[in-house]
Image (cartoon, rainbow, N blue to C red):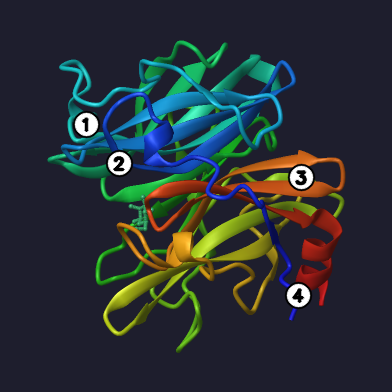
Amino acid sequence: MKSLFDRCDRNPILTPKDIPLPAEAVLNPGAAEQDGETVLLLRVEDTSGFSDIYVARSRNGVDDWRIEPEPLLRHGLPEWRYEQWGCEDARVTRLEEEKCWYITYTAYSQFGAAVGLARSCDLRSVERLGLIFSPNNKDACLFPRKFDGHWATLHRPDAGGGIENIWTASSPDLVHWGNPHCVLSEGPGPSWDNVKVGAGPPPILTDRGWLLLYHGVKMYAGQMAYRVGAALLDRDHPHRILARSQRCLFKATELYEQSGLVPNVVFPTGLLLRGEELWMYYGAADTVVCLATVRLRDLLDILES
Ligand code: BMA
């Protein structure tokens, strides 16, 4: 059967060898467009096991990446105690109203995994705004516009007892968050996403509502398989889910996805709409960065059926 997504024939498009320092892995990139170029916010795990966020730029979004020598978000700075062990898995959203990009990322420390927020107006320097969700919480991304005067985010609190669902929250100022709603829960019974779910890249507004790509996890022989599904959220009330794919839409089938530091992982964190096509940037096997494309209409058709 023809796959819904087309993998880039240059995959993996970035590997640890491309990074200007000894790196164990490069993975889970946030994606943005700036001055006609593609910008990826790469998670780079160094050879001690700690991660920072680096910026990579390319004219075509596929190759000839130029990687900044210094990280945009460096873990371990003395004044940021909640990220002493790592800055991981950045998602980036352009807020036109603020004329800036906002970056949500996993701030990892002895206190657990929390959600940090940072702002950048040039994707070269960054201003941290601090934590927006306390541990354990991951996989947060911002919607690009306000709803009734409030910003909105998706996030994935760990409810304990192995319950990990996707929630929304809203905020008047991007700093104080409240009004929680569960928007997408773990799949039932033996579903492909029955262990946990988490938001992927920031949602994209379509004529049917907000399109969300998310990762879902199921255990096979004691190992977690990370795969990708899609959902549609209401255009004006993003905590209302309109549709959800019943099956996973993208999974590890290639060697670079099935084999690596963590096998059988595809983990999308960047999504750009180019004409009729979505370009999905994802981490594969927690080791390399890859790209796959899909026609927006094909995804929406699946969600409608
Ligand atoms: C999640 C996160 C991701 C990682 C994924 C698969 O919990 O830690 O950074 O890619 O697991 O191992």
Q: Earlier in the sequence, mark 3 or mark 2?
A: 2
Residue at x 43% of width, y 42% of height: 15
Considering the image in quadrants, where does the C terminus appear?
bottom right
Direction from residue 22 to residue 265 in the image, left or right: right
The residue sitting at the bottom extreme is 189
Give ligand 1's quarter of the image: bottom left
Q: Earlier in the sequence, mark 3 or mark 1?
A: 1
Q: Is mark 3 within 8 Å of ligand 1?
A: no
Considering the image in quadrants, where does the N terminus appear?
bottom right
Q: Earlier in the sequence, mark 1 or mark 4?
A: 4
Residue located beneath label 2 in the image: 114
Q: Earlier in the sequence, mark 4 or mark 2?
A: 4
Asked if 17 appears above or below 165 in the picture, the reply is above
- Label 1 with label 2: CB-CB less than 8 Å: yes
Task: From the image, state whether disc 4 or disc 3 is nearer to you.
Answer: 4
- Closer-to-camera residue (234/304): 304
Residue located beneath label 1 in the image: 82
Residue 175 position within the rendered picture, expressed as x and y whole percent measured from the top left: 44, 26
The Cα–Cα distance between marks 1 and 4, rounded to whole angstroms, is 45 Å
Residue located beneath label 3 in the image: 205
The amino acid on which the numbered mark 4 sits, given as a three-letter code, is Lys
Q: Earlier in the sequence, mark 4 or mark 3?
A: 4
Residue at x 65% of width, y 14% of height: 99
The Cα–Cα distance between marks 3 and 2, rounded to whole angstroms, is 27 Å
Residue 177 position within the rendered picture, expressed as x and y whole percent measured from the top left: 45, 36
Residue at x 36% of width, y 66% of height: 263
The amino acid on which the numbered mark 1 sits, given as a three-letter code, is Tyr
Residue 269 position within the rendered picture, expressed as x and y whole percent measured from the top left: 53, 46
Residue at x 78% of width, y 53% of height: 209
Task: From the image, state whether disc 1 or disc 4 is nearer to you.
Answer: 4
Crowding around mark 1 (Cα neighbors within 10 Å: few <14, some 14 to 19, many 20+) is many
Residue located beneath label 4 in the image: 2
